[in-house]
Image (cartoon, rainbow, N blue to C red):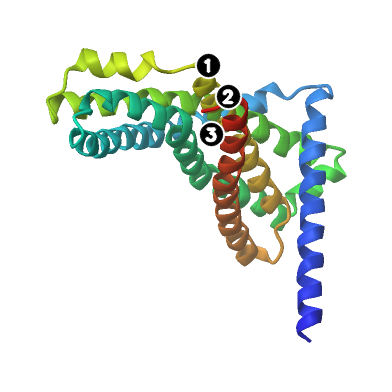
């Protein structure tokens, strides 16, 4: 009995991976098919990107502030408080900025995509689109995918900037450090590999958020309860994949750039 249960679970996982790969591949292939639905892409970009700015700004600012507090307290024991800005900028640009931005956008938008598309599946709106000759993947999935990847890229940059500024505000007004020294040390030691690593991660994270949210939304079954279940699964799976892929990308970048 246990073997049958494990066998069934393994088959379900493999089938889900296959369906996910097919949905993602077909959605990406629609990028090269005319007409390109620019209006839908801009609408999703406004909803996903502009709507996420407040939470990204708050998260970035307070994360930078906490980093400045913690690193300064530790570094001061060794007389190295002057490099607080350097550690804050490294942490925000290479790691915390992209990851926390991805997690915030995942919680806000992966759930929204799953619930919105799941509701359309349950109310048979997607079936009506197919009956009218419209491709749901081109109309519903592809715009969300493109908008999330593009907007998360810029949101991560915004989070990095605000995080470094938040760390600077704490360093200057609470810790009594020199502002010029903080900001000079925060960018002088940065190299191309650090910036590149911080800009590559949001691209992968954006793809994960949109593809997982749309996959669970388009796979919704079981009425309104199924919509709630799909929403929860989308947030959990996308968050776990963001953290796991962050480790893989970081290891790859360290192997390439040596830092």
Q: Is residue 44 visible?
A: no
On the picture, is 173 further left or further right than 236?
left
Determine whether the residue tagged by mark 2 lies in a helix, strand or loop: helix
- On residue 48, the disc is 3
Using the image, tell me which numbered label, if any, was put on residue 45: none
Horizontally, residue 31 falls left or right of residue 231, namely: right
Q: Residues within 10 Å of mark 1 (few under 14, many from 20)?
A: few
- Looking at the rendered image, the quarter that the N terminus falls into is bottom right
Q: Earlier in the sequence, mark 1 or mark 3?
A: 3
Residue 191 placement (x, y as % from top left):
48, 16
Distance between the alpha carbons at the discs numbered 1 and 2 = 9 Å
Which quadrant holds residue 134? top right
Residue 67 drawn above or below residue 239? above
Crowding at mark 2 (Cα within 10 Å: few <14, some 14-19, many 20+): few
Residue 47 rendering spot, x and y as whole percentages: 53, 33
Mark 1 lies on residue:
192
Q: Secondary structure at mark 1?
A: helix
Query: Which residue is pictured at 33% across the width and 29% down the height?
Result: 88
The answer to whether residue 169 shows anywhere in this view is yes
Q: Residue at (78%, 67%) from the top-left corner?
A: 10
Q: Earlier in the sequence, mark 1 or mark 2?
A: 1
Q: Position of residue 198 (x, y in %)?
A: 51, 27
Q: Are marks 1 and 2 in contact (CB under 8 Å)?
A: yes
Give the mark, 3 or 2, whose residue is nearer the N terminus.
Answer: 3
Identify the residue under disc 2: 257
Kindly report the distance in space between the C-alpha atoms of the residues bearing marks 3 and 2.
Answer: 32 Å
Spot occupied by residue 129 in the image (x, y as percentages of width and height): 80, 43
Q: Mark 3: which secondary structure?
A: helix
């Amino acid at each position: 009995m246990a073997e049958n249960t494990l066998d069934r679970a393994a088959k379900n996982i493999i089938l889900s991976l296959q369906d996910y790969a097919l949905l993602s591949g077909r959605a990406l292939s629609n990028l090269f098919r005319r007409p390109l639905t620019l209006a839908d892409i801009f609408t999703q970009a406004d909803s996903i990107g502009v709507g996420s700015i407040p939470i990204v700004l708050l998260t970035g600012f307070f994360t930078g502030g906490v980093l400045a507090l913690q690193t300064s307290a530790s570094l001061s024991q060794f007389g190295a408080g002057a490099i607080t800005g350097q550690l804050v900028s490294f942490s925000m640009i290479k790691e915390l900025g992209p990851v926390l931005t991805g997690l915030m956008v995942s919680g806000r938008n992966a759930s929204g995509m799953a619930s919105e598309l799941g509701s359309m599946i349950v109310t048979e709106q997607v079936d009506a689109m197919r009956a009218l000759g419209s491709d749901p993947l081109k109309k519903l999935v592809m715009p969300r995918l493109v908008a999330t990847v593009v907007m998360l890229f810029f949101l991560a940059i915004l989070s990095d900037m605000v995080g470094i500024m938040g760390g600077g505000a704490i360093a200057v007004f609470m810790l009594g450090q020199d502002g010029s020294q903080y900001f000079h040390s925060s960018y002088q030691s940065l190299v191309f590999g650090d910036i590149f690593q911080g800009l590559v991660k949001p691209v992968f994270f954006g793809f994960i958020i949109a593809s997982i949210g749309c996959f669970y939304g388009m796979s919704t079954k079981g009425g309104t309860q199924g919509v709630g279940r799909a929403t929860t699964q989308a947030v959990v799976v996308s968050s776990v994949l963001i953290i796991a892929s962050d480790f893989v990308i970081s290891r790859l970048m360290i192997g390439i750039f040596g830092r």
